[in-house]
Amino acid sequence: MKRDILIATHNLDKLKELEDLLNPLQFRLHFLHELPDFFPPEEDQDTLQKNAMKKALEAAKFSGLITLADDTGLFIAALNDAPGIMSARFAGNSCSYSDNRQKVLSLMQNTDQRKAYFKTAVALAAPDGIMAIIEGRLDGEITTEEYGNNGFGYDSIFAVNGKTYAEMKAIEKNRLSHRAIAIKAIIPVLQKIINT
């Protein structure tokens, strides 16, 4: 029998990535658009882990379903680890992906220090509490301009081994990305749920 899991995000790009990563587990996935009366909590915590836990727990309590939520940040050494937990809103509260990328490239015009890493915190919650919190991290570098047409967010300026996420096909990105690392690490917990 398939188990029901709620994915607590309204970000359609992230949702597609999570669907692809979770598909092999044969869960019956549910999404926040199925809960029109639920308003996601503000991401006002000071770490990715705390934001992910807050989102997962509040959605689980509201829905009655086991819920998976994540929070992701891009940490750039030359910018003192900015944008970090502010990655989605780096260029302002109503900014676009492009706005965020252009701000990063502008701030890094005069530096050769390009090291950066992506980190994702994935939280799994039941209505009565947090079941697991896992992190995935991938080191790379910030390019001097945008490359590639795939992906979303900072994908066209974050490179791993000389290739940006946006130059990769989805299947390639999902083999090595920060989000993939975190999801793979939480799979044993999900498999226990399937078997109980």
Image (cartoon, helix red, strand yellow):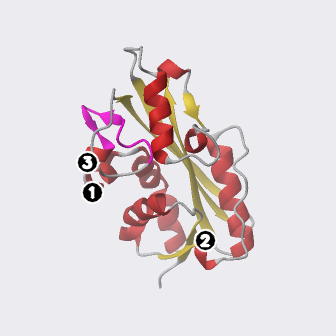
Q: Residue furthest bottom?
A: 1
Q: Quadrant of residue 57?
A: bottom right
Neighbours of disc 1 within 10 Å: few (<14), some (14-19), many (20+): few
Residue 160 x/y as whole percent = 30, 35
Would residue 159 appear left or right of 5 to someone viewing this image? left
Q: Position of residue 55 (x, y in %)?
A: 67, 57
Residue at 73% in and 63% down: 58
From the viewer's perspective, is residue 31 above or below residue 20?
below
- The numbered disc on residue 32 is 2
Label 3 to label 2: alpha-carbon separation: 28 Å
Q: Is residue 129 visible?
A: no
- Residue 171 tag number: 1
Q: First in sequence: mark 1 or mark 2?
A: 2
Instruction: Tell me which amino acid carries mark 1.
Output: Ile
Q: Between tags 1 and 3, which lies in front?
A: 3
Q: Quadrant of the C terminus?
A: bottom right
